[in-house]
Image (tube, helix red, strand yellow):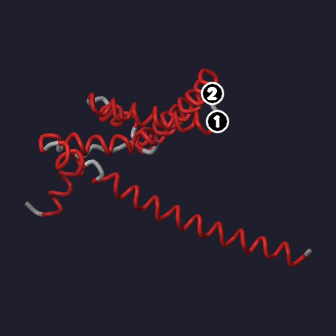
Amino acid sequence: MERSEYKKIVNRYTKKDNILKNAAIAFIVGGLMGLLGNFLVDKYICLFELSKTLASGLMIITLVFLGCFLTALGFFDDMVGFAKCGLIIPITGFAHSMISAGLEYKKEGFVTGIGMNMFKLAGSVIIYGIVAAFFVGLIRLLVGAIWHLNIKMYM
């Protein structure tokens, strides 16, 4: 069989994704995640009389717990199959990546299985996030210093 014939057969039977539909679903689900986050912050402020900063931290902990719990029960992958990036992009996706990698190696034990493999995917996200935050902070510091010097020069 020629390569071009093979490509035609593969293209005929390959499932085509509806990009517009997937983007709309991810947008709606991501918006609902944001709505859930705001709801949790408001409830934590009202119920526990916390500051917004503390309530926001508690909301993040709650969403990470939900992502971990749903991954451990096996529901999160099915939910992502429907919601696409609407569930993967928020903090729940980070929790899912850590727990799923850990669960994959749980037979090897707590330290060499779960502990060593939990940060396989999440480790690179953490490292690049820290490096990006450093450079953004450095740029902000330099721009702020230049801005401050320009204001003093004209006074």
Q: Circle 2 sits in a helix, a strand or a loop, which is it?
A: helix
Which quadrant of the rendered structure holds the C terminus? bottom right
Residue ID for mark 2: 45
> What residue do we see at 39% from left, 45% from top?
94
Marks 1/2: CA distance?
Answer: 7 Å
Crowding at mark 1 (Cα within 10 Å: few <14, some 14-19, many 20+): few
Residue 3 or 118: which is nearer the viewer? 118
Question: Quick one: which residue is furthest to the right in this view?
Answer: 155
Question: Quick one: which residue is furthest to the left in this view?
Answer: 1
> What residue do we see at 56% from left, 31% from top?
35
Residue ID for mark 1: 52
- Estimate the x, y position of residue 56 in percent, counting from the top left: 57, 37
Type of amino acid at the residue the image marks with label 2: Ile
Question: Quick one: which residue is furthest to the top in this view?
Answer: 47
Lateral position of residue 9 relative to residue 69, left or right:
left
Which quadrant of the rendered structure holds the N terminus? bottom left
* Vertical arrangement, residue 118 with respect to residue 25, above or below: below
- Estimate the x, y position of residue 124 in percent, counting from the top left: 35, 58
Type of amino acid at the residue the image marks with label 1: Lys
- Estimate the x, y position of residue 90 in percent, counting from the top left: 46, 42
Is the Cβ of the residue at disc 1 closer than 8 Å to that at disc 2? yes
- Estimate the x, y position of residue 13 in percent, counting from the top left: 21, 45
